[in-house]
Structure formats: structure tokens, C-alpha cells
Amino acid sequence: LESLQTGVPLVLESGTGSGKTVCAVSASLSFTLENNKKIIYATRTNAQQRQVILEARNIMSKFPDLTDEILAIGIQGRAHMCLLAREDTELQKGSADELARFCSEMKRKGNCKYFCNLLDDEDTLTEATSWMRIYLPTAEEVVGYCRKRSVCPYEINKLVIGEARLAVVPYIYIFEPNLRNLLLDLMGMSEEDLILILDEAHNLPDYLRDFMSAYLSAYMLNQCMVEIERYGNPFLLQRKTKTSEIVKEMYRVIYDLRRDYIENESLDKSDALLPTDELTLRLSEKLNLSPDDLRAISSSLIAYGEQIKDLKQKEKKLPRSYIYKLGTFLQFWTEINEDEYVRLIVDETDGRNPRVEIYCLDPSIGAKAIHAFHTSIHMSGTLSPLEEYRDSLGLPENTMLVSFPSPFPKENRKIIYVSDVSTRYDEIRYFDTVLDRIQNYICSICNSTEKNTIVFFPSFDLMREFIDRGILNSIDRTVYIEKREMSQLELMDIVSRFKNGRGGNTLFSVIGGRISEGMDFPAKELEVAIIVGIPYPKPTARQKALQRYYQQKFGKGWEYAVNAPTARKLLQAIGRLIRNESDRGIAIILDRRMPRFRKYVGALSLSRNVVEDVKLFISEGG
């Protein structure tokens, strides 16, 4: 309430299942009714959005007399809510801008039957508004409702959101300027009259870094050549240079940079910092261009890319142009602030698709939009250290930092670790006995109990190494394996089978991934979590640059760039075990360095006999 009344931001850490969502929503709704304001609740995933709508529905069921005053709407992008996009895999890959252009053209020409049906039947909008106000549907339920009536769910939401007291949106609707302005226009509100709630906020710094970054890959340049073959190869720069020359030379430069900075330096490197002018100097020398020429060429590429987008739009295709992306990337490359960005050559595919990258070090650049709101409430079960989160996002010094202990019985969760193994690079690379011991721990624990067990590895590569060593042959139960390339549908299928199997199953996953960050395993669905090693970030050039940046800005390079994200990953994985007051679970960390994180995880004990400790904990639960 203090944050709502004073406008001072609140950073709130409280465990999953502790009721922070319902508390934040109910308190904010009460405040908005008294002060003529509205709420935007931003989530990272559609699943989190659905949960917020269900919480709002539960709140409103207790106050039926407020039905006319409180409408909650879940907004998702066109890729999820456009019925044409749901029928076309190419459209599903479109960016917000690309889909907006496609949608605009289809509506203008009367080629979208779902939009036309909505225009022709005003009663449908009236009925939909009444239904949404009474039922408070999730975005998926809105899509289902509109599909049955052959009208556009995205447009229905746009027309109704002005009446909403609570709008639940993806992060991008806050941080992408065009989408944010669209949302504000549709709601008929300015930022100072809106309360912003950010869910799963521990993801926000990384999300903003990625959002403010850009890259150009070999694949993208190949697609530029496809566009040239399809739409033409115009001269740029007063008939001095053809478009294809720029594309081909950029392709060669990327591979040359890979060779000089990655391949020739170290077999284990996946990226390297580039000197400020390295890429543009090489490109200029190859094509005999001045810096002014390159700037002019960037503008010409952008203009030609816009023409290609228009042509694709007229062909009823996704208005995407890789030549446009090449132009904007070159322009961005020459304009970035050296204190806030680094330039990289990156190769994570053994030469199949190297890329040059502009990586944002400072998430506060993207977070500036937050400051305009009446207040912002940042919530997660894993935000510690709270000072790092506040500083990273550039929140004011007087931001309220609040951390609540878990409300669940302490005896329901046990965390133990072992002291004879570690996943430090030097140990697992040069001492096979360390991997042998880790494998023995994993197999012994899995075989000692009939409880569902997840094994969290620090990376897919290390998981694959254990599989290649034959670990599956030594586990006497069904083992499900998360794979890097799995679609969300495939992942949900194996998770469902893992949850519902009899006699205890095992799931191999990666810490910091989709399973450890965003999935619930209530009751008996998960009771044992094995964490293989401490998930420190890899010492890549990007990571080292981030550490230097935090050291220079805050004097806390290690604490902010290494320690904080590692602690959050550990807490997220351990947090899968306990989702309510009746859940029980034990986490085993296979790494002697775990005591460094005692202040984050609470009660932690060294195990002298892991299997016996696991059996004892399980037997105590009955």
C-alpha cells in the first residue's frame, strides 16, 4: 500500500505459493477504484499471464457486486491471437512490427474474413464485452470464443481493453515503444495514471539486455541473397556498389573475424570481443568505401528493405526483409555508446552460422520506460540480492526492498550438499574420477527412491557427456530427457509423462532453462531435485565484459554479474520442490562450493551419506 500511495517503486521477494500475486492484484484494484487509476500486469510467459487472470477471476468471485467496475483482460501478440496467424506457420514467426503491417494491409483490402465479420456484426462485440466482464476469460478462452463466431480475438481485445481495470500483457508491451504507445492509447490512459506490476521480475535484466541487443548472422546474409534474386540487385551509393557486393563482403568478413578472433585463438572459445572499428574497417577496405559511404549505404539498404516489405505485403506475405535488417544493424553498429554496449563475434555452431553481435550491458537503458508509471511493483520468488536488481534496472535509491521468508513449514524442505565433487572446468576436464563420482551420486539417488526426481545439469553439453558415458544404463527407472531443440509442445509432453508415471520417474533437465524457471510440480509430481554443480555463467567474452561493466559502474563485478544470477538459478531450481504448505522435497547439490550460497538458500547441511539422508527425509514424510 505504501508503494501505491507514495509512488515509490517496490521490489518484493516472496516464495511461489505465498500469495504475492493475489495480494498485489487485490490491493492494486482497491487503490485504483478509489483513485481512478488502472493496472498493467506484465508477465514473461503466456502461462504466467493465464495464472494472473485466474487469480483475478477468483478475487472477483468474492465481490460479484463489482462486476461492472472491474474487467480484467489478457493481451497477447498477434502471433497468438490472430486466427490467420494460427493457421500459418510463417506468420507465427513474425515480429510484432511485421505482423502489424500484415494485419493492416489485410484489413485495408478487406482480405481478413475475421475482421470483416466483426465489422458486419456489432452485436458480437456487445455480447463479447458482456461475456468478458462476467467471466474474465484468459487469452486462450477469448480465442476459443471468437473462433466459434469467426471473428478476430485480437481486434475484440483492442476494442474492449479501454474498459479494463486490469490489463495483463507480455513484457514487450511495456518496453517496445510502439506497442507501449498502442496499449496506452487503447486503454485511454497515460503512464502516470497506471500501476505497473512486473511478474517473475528476476528475468527482467536479462530480458532487457537481449531486447536492446542486435545481431547479424551468416544465415541472415544468405536470406539477403534470396531477396536479391527475388526482388532485384540495385546499385547503392550513386551506382558505385551493388547490393549483392555488400552482402557477399559482409559474409566474408564475418567468417574472417571468426577465424582471426575465435578459431585461431582457442578451441574452447565461442565468442570474442571486437575492436570498435574492426568490422567497418574491414568492410571499407574490401569495398574501398569511406565511413560516410558506409553510413549512406546503411540508409540505402534500409530504404530498399522497406520496398521489399511493401512488395511482400502486397503479395499477402509476411513483410520481412533481411536487407532491411542488414541496414539497421550496420547503422546501429556505428552509433552505439561504447560504455553501454560491446561488439562481439560469436560462433556457437562450429562455423555453420557465425554472427556479429551488439550486446547491451546496461539493462537500465531499456528499463527507463518503467519510471513514467505511477509506481512499479517488481515481484519474484528469487530476486535476492535485491540491491543488485535495483541497481541493474536503474531504480531510485529509495526503492522499497522487501523480502518475505517462506510461509511453509521449514521441515518440509531439506537442502544438502556433498564436498568431494565440483563441476569446476579444471576438475571435470582433467580428472575422470570426478565425473565418475558425480555419475555414481546421480544413479545411487535415483535408484534409492520411488519418488519423482529431476536432475538439473549446468548445460546441455554436460548432460550429453553423462549420457554418452552410459549413465542411462545405470538408472533403474524411466528417464525423460529435455533436449535443446525441443518445441514447447514436445517439452510439455515429456513433462506430463514424467509427472504422471508410476513408481517414480527421472527427468534430465538444464538449470536456468524452461523447466527450472517456469513449471510447477505440486504434491507428488516432484520430491527430489539433484543439482549437478554450481551454475556459474560460462566465462565467455560477453560474460567477462558484463563483469567489467558492473565493476566499473558499481564496484561489484563479481557480486552482480556472477554471484547474483547464479544464486537465482539455484533458488529457481530448488523452488520447484515446494509450491504449497503440504509439499515436501529434498534438494541435493553435487558441488563443494555450495556453502558460498548459504545466505540465499537458508538451512544447508553437508551430507556424509547422500542416499541415507534422502531415504531418511522421505521416510519422515510418511
Image (cartoon, grey):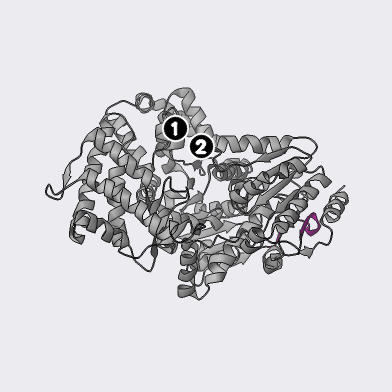
Residue 411: in magenta span: yes
Does residue 448 appear left or right of residue 157 in this picture? Answer: right
Q: Earlier in the sequence, mark 2 or mark 1?
A: 2
Badge 1 element: helix
Q: Which residues are magenta?
A: 405-417
Pick whichever, 248 or 1, lies toward us.
248
Q: Amino acid at mark 1?
A: Pro
Residue 176: in magenta span: no
Q: Quadrant of residue 124?
A: top left
Residue 139 numbered mark, or none: 2
The residue beneath circle 1 is 153
Residue 574 numbered mark, or none: none
Q: Quadrant of residue 571?
A: bottom right
Pick whichever, 107 or 37, lies toward us.
107
Residue 333's x, y, as percent?
Answer: 31, 58
Q: Quadrant of residue 485?
A: top right
Mark 2 vs 1: CB contact within 8 A = yes
Does residue 28 appear left or right of residue 616 in this picture? Answer: left
Pick whichever, 406 or 322, lies toward us.
322
Q: Say above or below: 76 vs 404.
A: above
Looking at the image, the residue that sits furthest to the left is 238
